[in-house]
Amino acid sequence: MGSPTEPSRRRLDRSCESGKFATRKSGDANGALQYYNTALGLDPKHLGANEYIGEAYLMLGKVAEAEQHLARLDSLCVFGCVEQRTLKQAIADFKAGKKTTN
């Protein structure tokens, strides 16, 4: 399967943003996971979806799952990217006992 076309990329981006908004505003991390899983099913390399799903897993206390998505971002962002840095910091904060504030 090739990479998504530009219109489908925009739909992925909107889906991720909708999911992040739902997570941040309602605290329903389980509900938001559907958006991220849909986006990752269409494009497993989507940086935002990997970051956001990692943050949602942290809200659920699932550090190992969040770290899996950080590892994916580490491999996708060879020279670093904001999504990788953001999720890495969120995991560090979680481990330090700081409350996430998506």
Image: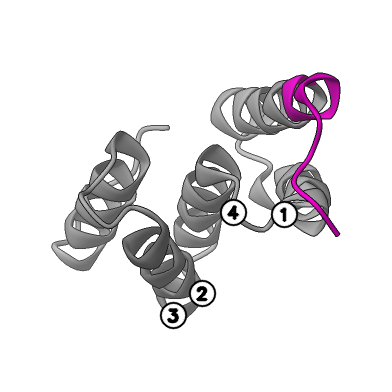
The first of marks 1 and 4 along the sequence is: 1
At 81% from the left edge and 30% from the top edge, which residue is drawn?
A: 5
The kind of residue on which mark 1 rests is Leu
The first of marks 4 and 3 along the sequence is: 4
| Range shown magenta | 1-10
Tell me if label 4 and label 3 are in contact, CB under 8 Å. no
Tell me if label 1 and label 3 are in contact, CB under 8 Å. no
- Marks 2/3: CA distance? 4 Å
Pick whichever, 91 or 78, lies toward us.
78
- Residue 29 magenta-drawn? no
Residue at the spot of label 3: 64
Residue at the spot of label 2: 65
The first of marks 1 and 3 along the sequence is: 1
The kind of residue on which mark 4 rests is Lys
At 50% from the left edge and 44% from the top edge, which residue is drawn?
A: 47
The kind of residue on which mark 2 rests is Glu
